């Protein structure tokens, strides 16, 4: 049975996802320049959007993880496929956290034109797993 509710246009659905997601979402070009950023990222770095756009994302990362992010961005552009990785790092002014990061290429006519980055804070999950591991080991 077909839905009787109208479906919102793609742009409206995407903007709603971008604006309301608790995950950090960025859209970057091949050099790592931020072309769009969601409110969750802006809150984390404590800056308004106009002070984030057109800056290199690596400016918001500690030196020791910048090369990993460069490598994963290059991989997403080269393969045209999503790239997932975990790391422990701060972003902007945040304390170090455990992050699950996915780089999702945007393809137009078979060519990667940009990459969306989604980063989910998994710190509490990692702490719970470590606590269970410790508890099981102690048994």
Image (cartoon, grey):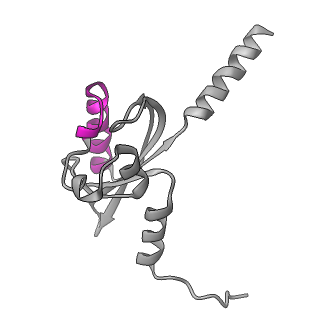
- The part of the image, by quadrant, that contains residue 70 is top left
- The part of the image, by quadrant, that contains residue 136 is top right
The one nearer the camera, 96 or 2, is: 96
Expressed as whole percent of the image width and height from the top left, the position of residue 69 reads 31, 37
Expressed as whole percent of the image width and height from the top left, the position of residue 137 reads 73, 11
Residue 67 painted magenta:
yes
Q: Is residue 51 above or below residue 137?
A: below
Chain part drawn in magenta: 58-78
What residue appears at the point 59 percent right and 29 percent down from the top-left corner?
A: 126
Residue 59 painted magenta:
yes
Expressed as whole percent of the image width and height from the top left, the position of residue 37 reads 34, 57
What residue appears at the point 46 percent right and 82 percent down from the top-left corner?
A: 9
What residue appears at the point 47 percent right and 69 percent down from the top-left corner?
A: 16
Instruction: From the viewer's perspective, tell me whether residue 27 is left or right of residue 21.
Output: left
Instruction: From the viewer's perspective, tell me whether residue 37 is left or right of residue 99.
Output: left
Q: Quadrant of the N terminus?
A: bottom right
Q: Residue most toward the bottom?
A: 4
What residue appears at the point 29 percent right and 68 percent down from the top-left corner?
A: 108
Q: Is residue 73 above or below residue 13?
A: above
Q: Is residue 75 above or below residue 6?
A: above
Expressed as whole percent of the image width and height from the top left, the position of residue 131 reads 68, 21
Q: Quadrant of the C terminus?
A: top right
């Amino acid at each position: 049975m077909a839905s009787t509710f109208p479906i919102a246009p793609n742009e409206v659905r995407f903007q709603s996802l971008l604006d309301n997601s608790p995950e950090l979402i960025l859209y970057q070009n091949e050099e790592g320049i931020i072309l769009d950023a969601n409110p969750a990222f802006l809150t984390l770095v404590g800056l308004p959007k106009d002070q984030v756009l057109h800056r290199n994302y690596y400016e918001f990362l500690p030196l020791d993880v910048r090369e990993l992010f460069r490598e994963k961005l290059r991989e997403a552009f080269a393969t045209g496929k999503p790239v997932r990785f975990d790391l422990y790092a701060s972003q902007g002014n945040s304390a170090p956290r455990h992050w699950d990061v996915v780089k999702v290429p945007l393809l137009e006519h078979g060519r990667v034109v940009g990459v969306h980055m989604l980063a989910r804070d998994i710190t509490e999950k990692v702490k719970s797993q470590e606590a269970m591991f410790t508890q099981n080991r102690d048994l």
